[in-house]
Image (spheres, helix red, strand yellow):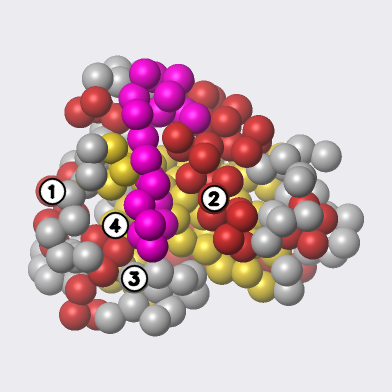
Amino acid sequence: MEPLTRALGRADYEPVWRAMQEFTAARGEGTPDELWFVEHPPVYTLGLAADPAHVLDPAGVPVVRIDRGGQVTWHGPGQLVAYVLVDLRRTGYGVKALVHRLEQSVLDLLAGYGIAGERRAGMPGVYVAGAKIAAVGLRVSRGCSYHGIALNVDADLSAFAGIDPCGYPGLAATRLADLGVRDTMDAVRRRWQETLLAALRPA
């Protein structure tokens, strides 16, 4: 059964995070998987083991310590986040494969626009010409994932100057709008939903 997909529009970060936790805690063996697509108001989030020194100048943007892996990242308008609430015990693949599949969904989306994306060894996410366009951060509880992957569509990339993105000083960011994509957020979401559903199919 394919995951149910939900387009949440723009929603505050913390209530969506808490809703993911509650969904994961309450789900049973037969609970369908879900994908949530959302934009957030500006927020910096720090993973469980993230070093707060990587927050250089938040400039009034909230900084929230959360329960995913990874270091610090930014979410905000113009960035589309796909939260992946999947029971890995049913899929036949593990966490590393899930990360690979999430990255693949973005690589396939980019290819559909004629853009060559790439992975970088030891640096989860998707890059174009060395600049990061998508960041991955996950949590797995009782064999079920939440959090997911964030894609820069037409976000204000200056927000990344306030942090060491994903813990890497000076890491450049890019966005679809700078790569010639003029689609609306909703059009990008529909295309990404197709590549994401395909990438997440059981092994």
Please name which of the two marks, 3 or 2, marks the residue nearer to the observer. Answer: 2
Residue 87 can be seen in this image:
no
Q: Local crowd at mark 3 within 10 Å, few (<14), some, or many (≥20)?
A: many
Q: In this figure, which residue is indicated by the disc labeled 1?
A: 158
Looking at the rendered structure, the kind of residue marked 3 is Gln
Mark 3 or mark 1: name the one nearer the start of the chain. Answer: 3
Residue at the (46%, 71%) spot, across then down: 69
Q: In this figure, which residue is indicated by the disc labeled 3?
A: 71
Q: Which mark is residue 74?
A: 4
Please name which of the two marks, 4 or 3, marks the residue nearer to the observer. Answer: 3
Cα separation, mark 4 vs mark 1, equals 10 Å
- Point out the stretch of residues depicted in magenta: 108-126
Please name which of the two marks, 3 or 1, marks the residue nearer to the observer. Answer: 3
Question: Could you say whether the residue bearing mark 1 is in a helix, strand or loop?
Answer: helix
Mark 4 or mark 2: name the one nearer the start of the chain. Answer: 4
Labels 4 and 3 touching (C-beta < 8 A):
no
Q: Which image quarter: residue 115?
A: top left
Cα separation, mark 4 vs mark 2, equals 21 Å
Cα separation, mark 1 vs mark 2, equals 28 Å
Work out whether residue 16 or residue 200 is closer to the camera in this orientation and state it: 200
Residue 72 can be seen in this image:
yes
Picture coordinates of residue 21, whole percent (x, y): 61, 68
Q: In this figure, which residue is indicated by the disc labeled 2?
A: 100
Q: Which image quarter: residue 4?
A: top right
Picture coordinates of residue 63, whole percent (x, y): 28, 70
The quadrant of the rendering that contains the N terminus is top right
Mark 1 or mark 2: name the one nearer the start of the chain. Answer: 2
